[in-house]
Image: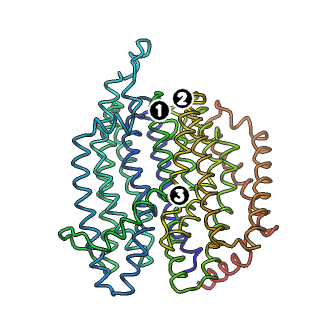
Amino acid sequence: MSLLKKFATVGGATLISRVFGFTREMMMASALGIGPVADAFNLAFRFPNLFRRLFAEGAFNAAFIPLFARSLEDEGEEGARRFAAEIFSTLFTVLALVTVAAMIFMPALVRTIIAPGLAVCIDDPVTLGHALSCEDRFGITVAFSRIMFPYLACMSMMAMVSGILNAFRRFFAAAVAPTILNFALIGILSYAWWARSTPQTIGFLMSWGVLFAGVGQLLVVTIAMRMAGFSVALRRPRWTPSLKRLLVLAGPAALIGGITQINLFVGQAIASYKPGAVSILTYADRPYQLPLGMVGVAIGVVLLPELARALKAGRMEEAQHTQNRSLEFALFLTVPAAVALFLIPEPIIRLIYERGAFEPATTAKVAAVLGLYALGLPAFVLIKVFSPGYFARENTRTPMIITMVSAGANTLLSLVLFWYYAERGIALATTLAGWLNAWLLFEGLRRQGLWHVDRALLKRSALVVLSSAAMGAALLAMMRLLAPFLDPQASVPEQAGAIVLMVAAAMIVYFALAFLTGAADRNLVAKLTRRRARA
């Protein structure tokens, strides 16, 4: 299977999950809007979801796969099974202890880490009749957090099983498993709409849905692992050299691979000082996660094993080629997506969310944040391209330092900009920190002689930018032409039709220019077409 096909396998499965995630967010926005229950759910879910993104989307794999692959090659399947059992047993024990401790001390966690803004919340007598009191907001955030926290344990164990599957080049099960969460929450929201449940009831039902979905995802990848002919036994935890080596690699890898999510988590914690800001950030996060997930996750999951194998075999030219083509692929898809999301965020947000409890005034706020997030989209994907260049060489120290610098910059910028621009300031801080991180990672590889940019990459990158600029001009022209159908008073079918026409026209312009100018690798496309025709 070619590198591009592997990207397509993981990216396609992730795309399915993101599409259903869109549906879930649309239904949630309609049911809860940006009210206190939506804020409480998003705050409570962000903490375990942070670990899902850190582990399940490549960071744990960055540490686990090279060590597991080495055990498999040097000691055979029995040695790999023993190594996996050591890691799984320790992971299970630690997660059990952490979960119990978190359930006990959850009020302190919410007050100091998850939502510090709720600890200093002051009730407004004018609006209190229409919203929950500060005490109630804090209470339901604690309750939701307690229900959902075991999801963290499920996702961490799922990450290890997914790493085993990826090491065996079986990517689909781990990529498609997150769809279970979306199915569960869509089902719950449909029931809540039918039963006309109150917002608080919906929040509690969704929290339980997250927990049960986590168990379901873990079962799916476990079954896939057994179908691959591999199993892991639970044993008494022991401190071994293999475990020590994994911890040395996994800590920095989790920090590095999850910098985008860490930045978002920090942003939401700061946003908890303003009612509604957390939900605004969450709703804006979903549209740009679609291209980020489809491209970034696919590259992060597939690139590391391919790069590690090439380096282990001493095929340096192949490693350089893999790195450059991955960067080329990332830019080819993310630059036009960033341009589109930056230019037309409001029509997109209006079509997706504006109904029920999601009011027109909220659309403008979410669209402004989405436009700023879009500017950082290429950077967030590039981080996933550059990081494997370090991980495959078992170097986590350099990218860890870079990530800490970026995270520090994000926190400082968020604190400063939030007081001037509210949630827009947090989005801008996240974008700036993302570009700083990507640039520092690339510079580190280039200065060490580990990344040599070839002429094809430079040429195609410049052509991608030019093609995307032309596409942006076409989008602006289409917006003026279709303005009556994009008006807030237009019907949903009219808005949807207008956006579909705009996107279709933009895609035609971009891909036509990309193929005519050579921004896309025409030889690669022709080769793939011939393979498909023979199939």
Crowding near pointer 1: few (<14 within 10 Å), some, many (20+)? Answer: many
Answer with left or right where residue 188 lies relative to residue 524.
Answer: left
User: First in sequence: mark 1 or mark 2?
Assistant: 1
Secondary structure under tag 3 reads helix
Q: Amino acid at mark 3?
A: Gly
Q: Earlier in the sequence, mark 1 or mark 3?
A: 1
329 or 324, nearer to the observer: 324
Q: Which residue is identified by label 2? A: 359
At 37% across and 83% down in the image, what residue appears? 72
Which quarter of the rendering shows the C terminus?
bottom right
Res. 524 image quadrant:
bottom right
> Which residue: 49% across, 69% down?
395
Q: Which mark is residue 218?
A: none
Q: Residue at x 27, y 73 (%)?
A: 240
Q: Are marks 1 and 3 in contact (CB under 8 Å)?
A: no
Horizontal and vertical percent position of residue 15:
52, 59
- Please tell me whether mark 1 sits on a helix, a strand or a loop: loop
Q: Secondary structure at mark 2?
A: loop
The disc labelled 2 sits on which kind of residue?
Answer: Glu
Residue 374, given in percent of the width and then of the height, sits at 63, 47
Residue at the disc numbered 3: 293
**How busy is the neighbourhood of tag 2: few (under 14 within 10 Å), some, or many (20 plus)?**
some
N-terminal of the two: label 3 or label 2?
3
Is disc 1 in contact with disc 2, using a CB cutoff of under 8 Å?
yes
Residue 351, x across and y down, in percent: 59, 40
In which quadrant is the N terminus drawn? bottom right
State the CA–CA distance, disc 1 to disc 3.
Answer: 24 Å
Q: Which residue is at 64% across, 31% downward?
A: 488
Residue 33's label in the rendered image is 1
- The residue carrying pointer 3 sits among few (fewer than 14), some (14 to 19) or many (20 or more) residues within 10 Å by Cα, namely many
